[in-house]
Image (cartoon, rainbow, N blue to C red):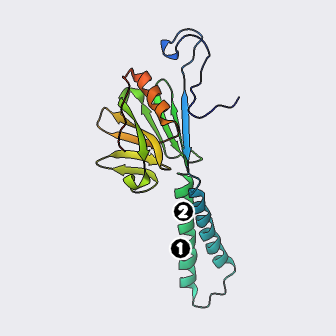
Amino acid sequence: MSEKPGAPRGDEGSQSPESGGPGTEPVVWTGRATNRVQWLLAAAGAACMALGIELAVDSPWTSGLAPLVMSVVGCVAAGLLMLFGTLAFVQVAVRVDKDTLEIRCGHIGLPRTRIPLAHVIGADFAPRVTPRHWGGWGYRWRPEKGTAVIVRRGEGFVVRLGDGRSYTVTVDDAESAVRVIRDRLRLPGGHAASA
């Protein structure tokens, strides 16, 4: 059975998932966002690595060994940084269950952030989050704004924690995520936040 992102899952029973009645399991909300443009940067990283390997294996370099080693190491290092940086943030997956908000980046799920809902004091919908506001794509931190996982521009949500920190995440169907988090926390309906 395939599920749509953002769709709550759980038993189809008549009891609400929060009631904890017999035969019900907690509703889990999942959502994700992807950025296909970053695959181009990953391809550029792979090309840098291939160039470095080609230079190391079959190079007609005549200027000495040191420039060749520096070129090979530079190409491979740049390629690895580009590959990791783009593949780690080409997508974000968000999971909200009855106790935890989990944010996982990339195809291997790292970096991963787990926030107990007991630490969350508020959640707001952010209709327009852009990488420009955070200084680029990826896992970002700004002292005046908090932490963010930005994989594309568009809608997202902001959760505020009791210790004053906040997390902004770009994800499809962010309004549903906010609604589920607020339901878990028994918070009233929210307002749009500027991210």
* Image quadrant occupied by the N terminus: top right
The mark found on residue 167 in the picture is: none
* Image quadrant occupied by the C terminus: top left
Q: Nearer the viewer, residue 62 or 36?
A: 36
Which amino acid type is marked by label 2?
Answer: Met
Say which label, 2 or 1, has the lower sequence index: 1
Q: Residue at x 68, y 31 (%)?
A: 2
Give the secondary structure at mark 2: helix
Q: With 137 as the anchor, is 106 left or right in this view?
A: right
Give the secondary structure at mark 1: helix
For residue 107, above or below residue 40:
above
Q: Residue at x 38, y 52 (%)?
A: 134
For residue 13, above or below residue 54:
above
Which residue extends farthest bottom?
Answer: 62
Which amino acid type is marked by label 1?
Answer: Gly
Task: Evaluate if marks 2 and 1 touch, with contact meaning CB atoms under 8 Å apart.
Answer: no
For residue 177, above or below residue 137:
above
Q: Residue at x 53, y 68 (%)?
A: 78
**Residue 33 image-quadrant placement:** top right
Q: Which residue is mark 2?
A: 82
Q: Which residue is mark 1?
A: 74
- Looking at the picture, how far across and down is residue 164, in whole percent? 29, 37
**Mark 1 neighbour class, 10 Å CA radius: few under 14, some 14 to 19, many 20 or more:** some
- Looking at the picture, how far across and down is residue 182, in whole percent? 41, 25
- Looking at the picture, how far across and down is residue 98, in whole percent? 48, 23
Q: Nearer the viewer, residue 29 or 61?
A: 29
Q: CA distance from mark 2 to mark 1?
A: 12 Å
**Mark 2 neighbour class, 10 Å CA radius: few under 14, some 14 to 19, many 20 or more:** many
- Looking at the picture, how far across and down is residue 122, in whole percent? 35, 30
Q: Residue at x 68, y 77 (%)?
A: 57
